[in-house]
């Protein structure tokens, strides 16, 4: 069994992929646009029975896979109806050391919002929480006890 996060960016998927590529070194390993689908884009069956108000823009991302370090994430523009909403979870990024954590935290925070400043805690010498410009929550952590 394998569980992977699938993020719906509601029309901003390509922008998000580029953001993660430049900030975190993400590698896009697969990208399919709606225009590449063998199923007509107005067909609701294409999206597991989802009701569509009309065909999505043909250049929108239907499905993408990307890697950040050893982790593969999945992404899509989804139906691109509303702003993306990411609630009830955060992605946890383990940094090699405090300098790496600071760099990645700052990169993720560009255009986003710091929820908990990066600093020492009882469970880590360096931990913080930030929401990126797309609304995805990130927890950046250096493993190990507080020094």
Image: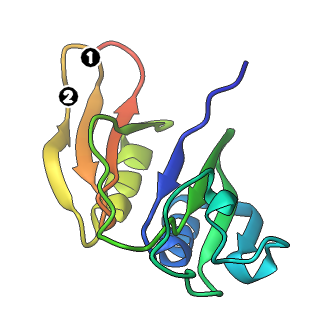
First reached walking from the N terminus: tag 2 or tag 1 = 2
Q: What percent of the width, then of the height, locates residue 135?
A: 29, 59
The residue under label 2 is: 120
The residues bearing labels 2 and 1 have C-alpha atoms spaced at a distance of 6 Å
| Local secondary structure at mark 2 | loop
Answer with left or right where residue 42 lies relative to residue 40: left
In the image as oriented, which residue stretches furthest toward the bottom? Answer: 58
Residue 34 x/y as whole percent: 69, 77
- Residue located 45% across and 76% down the image: 53
Tell me residue 26's x, y (percent): 62, 59
Give left or right: position of 20 versus 3: left
| SS label for mark 1 | loop
In the foreground, 40 or 147: 40
Q: How is the image coloured?
A: rainbow
Point out the image quarter for the N terminus: top right
Please tell me how crowded label 1 is: few (under 14), some (14-19), or many (20+) other residues with Cα within 10 Å: few
Q: Quadrant of residue 125?
A: top left
Could you tell me if the residues under marks 2 and 1 are in contact, i.e. CB atoms within 8 Å?
yes
Name the foreground residue: 67 vs 1.
1
110 lies above or below 54: above
Query: Which residue is labeled 1 in the image?
Result: 146
Which residue is painted at 66% across and 70% down in the image? 43
Bin the neighbour count of mark 2 within 10 Å (Cα to Cα): few under 14, some 14-19, many 20 and up: some
């Amino acid at each position: 069994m394998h569980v992977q996060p699938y993020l719906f960016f509601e029309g901003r998927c390509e922008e998000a992929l580029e953001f993660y590529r430049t900030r975190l070194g993400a590698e896009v390993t697969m990208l399919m646009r709606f225009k590449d689908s063998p199923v007509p884009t107005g067909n609701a069956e294409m999206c597991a029975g989802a009701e569509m108000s009309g065909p999505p823009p043909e250049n929108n991302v239907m499905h993408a896979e990307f890697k950040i370090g050893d982790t593969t994430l999945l992404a899509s523009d989804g139906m691109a109806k509303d702003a993306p909403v990411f609630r009830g979870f955060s992605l946890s990024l383990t940094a090699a050391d405090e300098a790496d954590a600071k760099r990645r935290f700052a990169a993720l925070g560009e255009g986003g919002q710091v929820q908990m400043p990066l600093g020492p805690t009882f469970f880590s010498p360096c931990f913080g929480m930030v929401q990126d410009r797309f609304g995805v929550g990130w927890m950046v952590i250096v493993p190990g006890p507080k020094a």
